[in-house]
Amino acid sequence: MNRSLFSALKLEKLAMFIILTLIIIVACFNIVSTLIMVVMEKTKDIGILKSIGATNRSIMAIFTLEGFLIGAFGTVLGLAGGLGLSYLLEKYQFIQLPRDIYYIDRFPVDVQLGDTAAIVLAALIISLLSCIYPAWQASRLNPVDALRYE
Amino acid sequence: MIEAKDLHKIYKNGASQLHVLKGIDLKVEKGEVLAVFGPSGAGKSTLLHLLGGLDAPTKGEVYINGIDIYSMNGYERAKLRNRKIGFVFQFYHLLPEFDALENVVLPLLIKVENRKFRDIRERGIEILTAVGLNERLHHRPNQLSGGEQQRVAIARALVNDPEILLCDEPTGNLDSETGKQVLDLLWNLNRKQNLTLIIVTHENEIAKVAEKVLYIKDGRVMSAVPSFVTSDIRN
């Protein structure tokens, strides 16, 4: 019994997974392109830092850190937003479900520490990974090209 | 102490090649002043970048204290730029978000040598005072005049006590009065601290003081220095 319901739920889960993956990919591209813009904007400054002895490694560290901080800030915002919304949903139960399809009439909320931690960790790792390419590009800039006259 | 042997630099841009330096030899001893003259596009700046380890020559070697700096890896060369070499550029190249003091202490911060922030700050103030800018510590580059910005840039180049100062048209963007002040500052450093100076320039004034004059044209050192340079020297 209930086979059709379970297969429908399974399909729904798959669809959700695909949609969330796409959202994450879009977010990654956002981080990457923002950072590439920052690197381009700071080209001259990178040249200056290199001329006074900054190593490629430290240039890479600077931009990775910047991207990671942006990602961490976003993660904190998202965490607060998500937890806040879950809390409100649990308290006021404003999403109603049609009784004839589901066995419950309110959207259930179950915040689990493990899930939350996994999501936060994944978000941080993804933002860190997105920084690597732009930061690597920044570190490889030729200082002479970067300092070419204004 | 700094020596270049048969330096070549070729820029490749797609299929076309630009042979900027065609075999430059030079030698500068400690405490000497070398003035590099030449028309625009002769390769003066490229030469300076190569001497300072900022770029890589297509062929040839650069020796600083007897060590071929292009046999080092990038990390060691960055360390060398930080400790032994100071760059001064025509357009100052200060970081616009930082004030004068912060700009000056950057090489100290990059050096990473268990120094306390207080010591770093004190050294920054000391060197800015030495170039006459103790009243301007917390001004940003856009609040400073051209001459002041160039003095901040010189202070930044000096903060790690380098052995060589490489100047790319240090007065090129300044009026003659401010330019003279900047040059006086450089001569003082040369005399008092025995600092080696290599100056790319258009100003004949500099050739009068320099021990050595190099005239570069089309990527080669010309043995005959043109009269507009030498006539001033002899006067």
Image (cartoon, coloured by chain):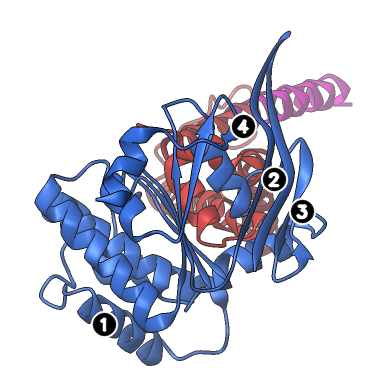
Asked if disc 4 and disc 2 are in contact, CB closer than 8 Å, the reply is no
Q: Identify which residue, A24 or B32, lies in the foreground.
A: B32
Q: CA distance from mark 4 to mark 2?
A: 47 Å
Q: Nearer the viewer, mark 3 or mark 2?
A: 3
Q: CA distance from mark 3 to mark 2?
A: 33 Å
Residue on which disc 1 sits: B125
Asked if disc 3 and disc 4 are in contact, CB closer than 8 Å, the reply is no
Q: CA distance from mark 3 to mark 1?
A: 34 Å
Q: Identify which residue, A83 or B164, lies in the foreground.
A: B164
Q: Secondary structure at mark 2?
A: helix
Note the chain letter of the red one. A
Q: B61 above or below B99?
A: above
Q: Nearer the viewer, mark 1 or mark 2?
A: 1
Q: Identify which residue, A38 or B175, lies in the foreground.
A: B175
In this orientation, does residue B96 appear?
A: no
Q: Nearer the viewer, mark 3 or mark 4?
A: 4
Q: Nearer the viewer, mark 4 or mark 2?
A: 4
The numbered dot on residue B45 is none
Residue on which disc 2 sits: A129
In this orientation, does residue B104 appear?
A: yes
Residue range highlighted in magenta: A1-24
Write the residue at 34% across / 40% down: B229
Given the image, on which type of amino acid does mark 3 rest?
Tyr
